[in-house]
Image (spheres, helix red, strand yellow):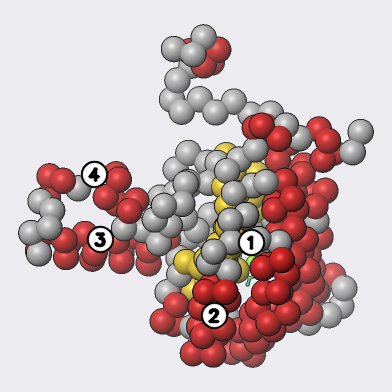
Amino acid sequence: MAIIHQIDKKKLPKHVAIIMDGNGRWAKQQGKNRVFGHKQGAKSVKEIVQAAGELGIEYLTLYAFSTENWNRPKLEVDALMALLISSINSETKELIENNVRLLSIGNHNALPKNVRNKLFQAIDQTKNNTGLTLVLALSYSARWELTEAAKKIAGLVVDHKISVDDIDEKIISDNLTTTNIPDPELMIRTSGEYRISNFLLWQLAYSELYFTDKLWPEFGKEEFFKALMNYQSRERRFGKTSEQLEHNI
Ligand code: IPE
Ligand code: IPE
Ligand code: MG
């Protein structure tokens, strides 16, 4: 049976987050430069966005560029920014056709102005779509996000909008860049690295983690379905015992 038919549509995660890693190594294997790997990686993005939309997943967050990635060679950073613009140019029409709503999290002020403008334009053009919400993490790092949240919450206290005792998990969540987005039930990382690399540290607190050796340009629909199947085979206990879950107590 094709793997897609083995997925229980009633037990899909609402939100899947992906650390798309391994473009550079994939390119090296092909004897090509890193930028070639990023271009191929963009094809995987297209395929996974389609698959997530077709399955009816509500949120897909893709780690596309981290705060730390600014430290890469300028040529690579410039190529990634150019690829972002050309991808937005070529894909926005399809996002609209497929009812995908685009959002982005990250320090947008750090992005070149032309990238920022394009990004906000696409976000605006897709804002009324009601299908998959695609969240691009761009110039994002969780420590940056948590630092910003701390500043915002401190501001609320200083302005007497809330008191220190009002600060709870909800206030912290509400002041992150992912306001109103449920925490990911599943986080996938490709390329055989077993780390979080400063991604969604707060939101991943209870996510199921799935690691695969596949490099991002090799990660297609079948691989995505495999990750979802694996997720569906897990028992999410949230601190309780199996018996409690079984008897719903
Ligand atoms: C992920 O692939 C893409 C970005 C971080 C932008 P990499 O470029 O990190 O690929 P590797 O890890 O060097 O193979
Ligand atoms: C993580 O990949 C960031 C993105 C996928 C955008 P990296 O390749 O930058 O991660 P590290 O530095 O190897 O942990
Ligand atoms: Mg990498």
Residue lying furthest front: 128
Q: Earlier in the sequence, mark 2 or mark 3?
A: 2
**Residue located at (7% from left, 59% from top):** 160
Looking at the rendered image, the quarter that the C terminus falls into is: top left
Q: Is residue 60 visible?
A: no
Q: Which numbered dot is residue 121?
A: 2
Q: Name the amino acid, label 3.
A: Ala
Q: Gap between marks 1 and 3, in whole Å?
A: 31 Å
Q: Earlier in the sequence, mark 2 or mark 4?
A: 2
- Above or below, 32 against 184 in this view is below
Is label 4 within 8 A of ligand 2 (CB to nearest ligand atom)?
no
Q: Which residue is mark 3?
A: 150
Three-letter amino acid code of the residue under disc 4: Asp
Q: Earlier in the sequence, mark 2 or mark 1?
A: 1
Residue linked to disc 4? 168
Label 3 crowding class (10 Å Cα cut-off): few <14, some 14-19, many 20+? some
Residue that label 1 marks: 100
Q: Position of residue 20 (x, y in %)?
A: 66, 62
Task: Estimate the spatial distance between the alpha carbons at disc 1 and disc 4, rounded to whole Å.
Answer: 32 Å
Give the mark nearer the N terminus: 1 vs 4.
Answer: 1
Disc 1 versus disc 3: nearer the observer? 1
Residue 248 visible (yes or no): yes
* N-terminal label among 4 and 3: 3
Q: Are marks 2 and 3 in contact (CB under 8 Å)?
A: no
Quote the CA–CA distance across marks 2 and 3. 29 Å
Residue neighbourhood size for the residue with mark 4, other residues' Cα within 10 Å, grouped as few (<14), some (14–19), many (≥20)? few
Q: How far is mark 2 from mark 1, CA to CA?
A: 14 Å
Nearer to us in this view, 238 or 119: 119
Looking at the rendered structure, the secondary structure element under dot 3 is: helix
Give the structural element (helix, strand or loop) at label 4. Answer: loop
